[in-house]
Amino acid sequence: MATVLKVFERWKEFLGQRVTQAEQAGMTEETISKLAFQIGEFLSDKVDPENKEERVLKELWDVGDEQERKCLAKMMVKLAKTNA
C-alpha cells in the first residue's frame, strides 16, 4: 500500500483534511499559511522527496526567496482545501 508521502494525491487529501481540522479549530487562513511555511521549511531541509510532484515543489522552494516560499505555502493550503 502506498504511503501518504509516496502518492501525491493521497498527500493532497491528507493536507486537505488537516486544513479543514485547523479551520474547524478556529485557526485563520493566515495562521494556517504561516504553519504551512514552517512545515515547508522543515520538509525542504529534512525530507527527501518521494515522487516527481514533491521533487518539483522542493525545487521551486529551493530557488524561491522567503516571500516566494510563503506564496508557495499559501498556494499549497489552497490546493489542499480543494482536496479536503
Image (tube, rainbow, N blue to C red):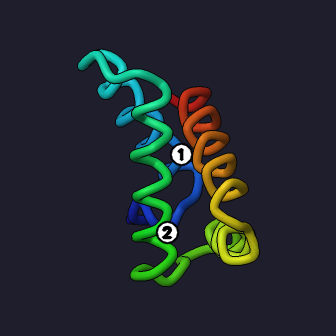
Q: Is residue 51 left or right of residue 43?
A: right
> Left or right of 1: which side holds 49?
right
Relative to 40, does residue 76 appear above or below in the rendering?
A: above
Q: Where does residue 41 sit, x and y in percent of width and height?
A: 47, 67
Helix, strand or loop under label 2: loop
Instruction: Measuring from the top left, give residue 69's x and y in whole percent.
Output: 64, 58
Residue in view at x 73 percent, y 68 percent: 64
Q: What residue is drawn where x is 41% and y is 58%?
A: 39
* Circle 1 residue: 12
Q: Position of residue 19 (x, y in %)?
A: 41, 32
Picture quarter with the N terminus: bottom left
**Sequence-wise first label, 2 or 1:** 2
Element under disc 1: helix
Q: Which quadrant holds residue 53?
A: bottom right
Q: Is residue 22 left or right of residue 69?
A: left
Residue that numbered label 2 is attached to: 6
